[in-house]
Every structure is written in C-alpha cells, then in structure tokens.
Amino acid sequence: MPQDAFTLFHTAKELDRLLRGAKINKVSQPDKDDVYLLTYSAMGSRTLVLSANAENCRVGFTENEKPNPKIAPNFCMLLRKHLPGSEIQSVELVGFERIVKITFNCKNDFRENVVKILYCEIMGKYSNLILTENGIILGCLKNAPLDVATTRVTLSGAKYSLPKPQDKADVFNRGEIAEKMKTFNGNDLPKFLFENIKGMSFPTAAECSARVTLEGGDVAKQIENFLLFPEIRPNIAGEGKLKDVYVADYLTIGGNKTFFDEISAAADNFYSAKERTKLFDSTKKKLLDKVNGVIKKLNKKLQGESEKIAEAQNLESLKLKGELLTANLWKIKEGEEFCVVENYYDEYKPVKISLDKTLSPNRNAQRYFKKYAKQKRALEIIIPQKLQTEKELEYLSTVNFEISQAQTVADFKDIETELVSAGLLPAPKFRKKAENESTYRVYEIDGFTIKCGKNNLQNDRLTGRAFKDDLWLHTKNYHSAHVIIETKGEGIPDKIVEIAAEICAYYSDARGGNKVPVDYALKKFVKKPPQSKPGSVIYTDYKTCFVDPSPHDELAK
C-alpha cells in the first residue's frame, strides 16, 4: 500500500466507524512485529492487526491469524496487563502524519476509569507500537535505533513525543498549500507535491497531480478535496512494483483492479497474499539451501571415493609384481632401483618393476603385497560407501524435486518432517500439537478417484493405504509422484489410466518432455523395501504406457 497519511487517514476513519465502543477480548503477538487484538462489538468479533513490520506495516482487520509462540513477548504481556476488557473510544490519525492513535477506556487496579492510548507509527523500517498513559510511555514494541534515540526517547517512563515534523504544507491548512504552490515552477508536479505536501507517497502525488487543474481553479482546494474527501473505492491494482492496495480508484494506476467493500478487507487480502508469498519463498529457500548444501558435500565425497577406487584399479598389478619378485629373488641384487623379470602369466613378456634400493629384494616383494592388501581392504570399504553415497544423492534429488513442485507453504510440512527424520534439519524445540495430514492432489472423472502425492511422505501414505486392487502409477526412470486410481472393485477404462498417467508424468522430472514412459501395476505388486528411504518402492507385474504430461486442473477437486 502507498502507506502514506492519505491512506492511513481514511483507514483510521473506517476503523473508527467500525470499532468505536468495541471491547478488547484478547491480545496476542504471533511474531516480533505483529500484535493482534480480538475485538467484540454489536457487529461481532473481528481481529485487529497492528503491524510494525518494515515491509508490511499497517493497521486493519485480518482474517488470517497466525499461531502464537509458547512464550508471549514482553510487549504482548504489557498489553495483556492493560487492554483486555477495555473499550475503544476512538481511532484517528495524528494530524496528517503516519501515526494512528487508538484510544482505550480502561480500568486500573482500583477499578477506576483511565484512558490509555496506543500509538501505531506506520513508518516503514521505523514503524513502532507505543502504549501510553497520561502522555507517559508504558512500553513499546521496538527499542528505538541509535539514530532515532538521539533525537527522540521512546523508553518506558519517558514522555511520549511525536517524531520531528517534516517541512511540508499541512493538508488541513489550505493557506500553507497555496503558499507552497506559488513556488511551483511548472515542471514536475507529482515530484513537487510529493516533496512539499504532507502525507503523500509518490503514487498518491501522481494521482493528485492528474486530478488537479492548474489553470482557472483553486489548486489548494482541489488538493484538499482529493486528500480529505475522495470517493472511497478500496481496490488492489497495478503491476510489478506498482501493484498495491489503494483506498480510491487511482486513474494513474493501470492493470486489473479488484474492488472491496472495506479498506481493511483490501489490505488484508493484499498483505496476506504478500506474506504467504514471502513465507513460501523463504521456506523454499531454507529447504533448498539445506538440501543443496548436503548434495554439494555428498558430491565432493563421491568424487573422493571415485578417485580412491580409480587409484585401486592397479590392484592386481601390485599382486603380480609381488609374485614376480618372489619368484626371481635370486636374480635381484640389493641396491638396485628397478629390475626386469619375465611375466610367466603373459607368455614370458619382460616386466620392469620399480624397487626401493634401501630394501632387500624380499622386503620389496613384501612391500608390493602390503600395498595390494591395503588397497583391497580399501576397496571393500569404499565401494559400499560409494553405493550408499549414490543412494543418498538419488534420494536427495527426489527431495529437491518435491521442493520445486511445492505450490503452498502447507506442501513443505511433510518435506520438513522428512528432513528432520533424516537428520538434515534440527528437531523442533517444542512438540507441536497433532496436525491434520496434508492433502493429496485429488481428481474425479467418470466416477473414478485419482490421487497424486506431493512428496515422499505423502507417496508412502498414499501407496501404503491403497487397496490391493487399486492401480498404482509411476514414471519409468524418472522421479515422480506416486499416483493411485481407486478401483472399488471395478475395471478401469484405458481412458482413465491414460489421464492418470498424464498427471503422473506432469508431476515428474519429465514434465517438459513428450511420450513419457509411465509404469502401472496393481497395488498388490508394489512393495516398500525394509528400512528404505521415504518414497522408495519396488514393483513387478507392470505395464508401460507413453503419454504427454498434463496437470488436468479441470478435473481437480
């Protein structure tokens, strides 16, 4: 949102109309920047979010509550001490600054009425929430950074003071606006308004500029009318960096526009989507960084194991040299650096063998036998290790595929659980309450249900719970989701199998290809090997079809 005073002024007016007289039932602080107040009025319960997040700072209603931490933060405890049971007297903007003032009628310890004010300073990275009584600060959400603390104290017990005002014309003083407009040189009006009139972000200044008639009109009055008395039409509009939520229909903002009945509803829709996207991206990055970090280490380990195996390829030649030296001890003189002997295994061809001149011929032979034994033992250890490393890499590539296929934050839950069980992520400090299992992708066609897993744990659940006569599908030689067609004892038409195979191919590594091979077999022929990784199965008695990948979204439930 262009979180300027223009937007906050009309947001505060809307909240004042809806919340005046509302009671505070509950206070929570799900994260370090957001405070939730559960309000109750004649219109029912609504949750008011006060966010001091640098990117998403706002004041408004929300329908998307977050889970609370096990231990409430200090500011939350302070608000719980003072606000529950209180009544909201008013919600208003302080002057035309980006500060929303919420006034509460509370009871003190002696059951006397006292007024407490919560200042919501919506100022980007300097956003803050400050609770006061009689002008004295009771506490604040954030401690002021050093560059602010030198000019303004926000400590408990200090007197609350407003931030230093900007040298701009006040919207409520038409004379000041008129004086500022006299200095306009006729070049860039949006920039001029942005730099000289209080309370306008640049998009708002550009919109005001588009609505102002410079010739033959009272410019100051036009600016005042736009800022204080616009036609309220909350909407989400714009593309790219201009995509935002606006309190009015900005003529200067193009793209598709979605309109809402309330400013808070538009803001909640916009910021909830923004937060979901940010959470999705951050969770995805965290998981990818962890998995790719392990893959990098395993690749380095695999390279080392491969090099050691390559070094041991001359294993038999070491044994041969030891035997030839033993057979020709009588020919070899001490102090020689090499000798040439006949290889009776290969038509008596001459073989040149390097010697350690400090050792006797017999000890040189024993040296080759020791090297042979050492490398043989190393191979016995390294080859299984290399196979295990390759299996780990193969498994992690399936996890990488799952992460890339995820579409919502909920899709990451099973992946995180899987990585915790694999020891790649630390176990949570607190045991979470039992959560509902994440849902499969489900499709309905002609009375048949097709289910598609989203990750390895889901694949295990889906395949493990299928009936023996259900049909199981998986791409051949590619990572893919497990797909089940529920038969319910009926024969499955080829058309249904083809559609399920297309879905399976789409949710696989072969999504971008054509004629992808997909194996299918009855569930009774699909087994999970003991102690195998999640999502691993073996199967027999299968057939293969070739299909073009398709998500078939039109069939999804």
Image (spheres, rainbow, N blue to C red):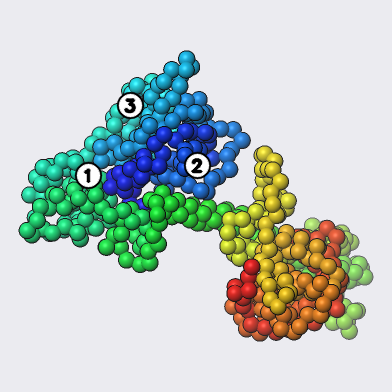
Earlier sequence position, callout 2 versus callout 1:
2
Q: Residue at x 47, y 33 (%)?
A: 23
Earlier sequence position, callout 1 versus callout 3:
3
Residue 44: assigned label = 2
Q: Nearer the observer, disc 2 or disc 3?
A: 2
Whether residue 131 is situated above or below residue 437 in the rendered picture: above
Left or right side of 317 for 292:
left
Residue type at tag 1: Lys
Crowd around label 2: few <14 · some 14–19 · many ≥20 (10 Å):
few
Residue that badge 1 annotates: 198
- Residue 501 in sight: no
Q: Quadrant of residue 542?
A: bottom right
- Residue 343: x percent and y percent? 87, 78
- Residue 252: x percent and y percent? 27, 63
Residue type at tag 2: Gly
Q: Secondary structure at mark 2?
A: strand
Q: CA distance from mark 2 to mark 1?
A: 36 Å
Q: Residue at x 66, y 66 (%)?
A: 441
Residue that badge 3 annotates: 160
Q: Nearer the observer, disc 2 or disc 1?
A: 2
